[in-house]
Each structure stands twice: as structure tokens, then as C-alpha cells.
Amino acid sequence: VDNESKKKEATLLTLSCEKSSQILGWEPILTFEETIEMTARWYKEYYDGKNNVYNLSLSQIENYMQQASMRNAVWA
């Protein structure tokens, strides 16, 4: 029990996509800017409460799939 109390959690956790890129050939579909814009729009709509975020979510998924197809994603 004493050893458990001495463990510290990392203050900064990061995600690396390097392994999935190398092994699976994965590449992101959206740019960083596109990702931020879609995320910000979703949260704005959600907190404004004026529109149905379910429909927005479906629209964003459709947009994502179209972008993947246009950018020649292997799975699309």
C-alpha cells in the first residue's frame, strides 16, 4: 500500500499515431483546422441548444466520409 501512494500519474499524456501509420498505413482524413472547426461547431450547437446535434452529427459523418473518398482513403 505504501508503494502505491508513491506512484505519480504523468502530468502530460500524449497520443502518437506513428505505430498505426507504420503498421496499418493509417493517415488522418481531416486537417487539424478541419477537425477543430467541426468539433467547435458541434459544441457550439450543443450548448446553444437551438439545433438538433443528432442531425449535425449525421451531417458531419457524411462530410467526413466524402472527404475520405475525395482524399483517396483506402477504406473509402
Image (spheres, rainbow, N blue to C red):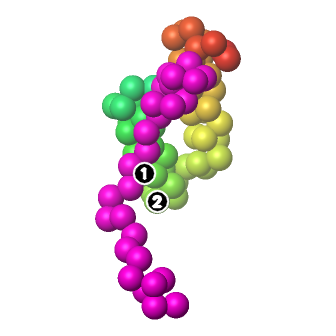
Q: Secondary structure at mark 2?
A: helix
- Residue 38 sits above or below residue 9 on the image: above
Q: Is residue 32 above or below residue 11?
A: above
Left-right relation of 34 to 27: left
| Residue 38 seen in the figure | yes
46 vs 70, nearest the viewer = 70
Residue ID for mark 2:
47
Residue 42, given in percent of the width and then of the height, sits at 49, 46
Can you identify the residue that label 1 sits on? 44
Residue occupying the point 60% across, 41% down: 57
* Residue 6, position as x, y percentages in the image: 38, 82
Disc 2 and disc 1 in contact, CB within 8 angstroms = yes
Q: Which residues are magenta?
A: 1-28
Q: Residue at x 65, y 36 (%)?
A: 58
Residue 8 counted in the magenta span: yes
Give the amino acid type for the residue marked by disc 1 in the picture. Lys
Q: Vertically, is 28 above or below 58?
A: above
Quadrant location of residue 73? Answer: top right
Q: Nearer the viewer, residue 23 or 57?
A: 23
Residue 36 picture quarter: top left
Name the residue furthest bottom. 2
Q: Residue at x 39, y 49 (%)?
A: 14
15 in the magenta segment: yes
* Residue at image location 45% in from the left, 57% down from the top: 48
The type of residue carrying mark 2 is Tyr
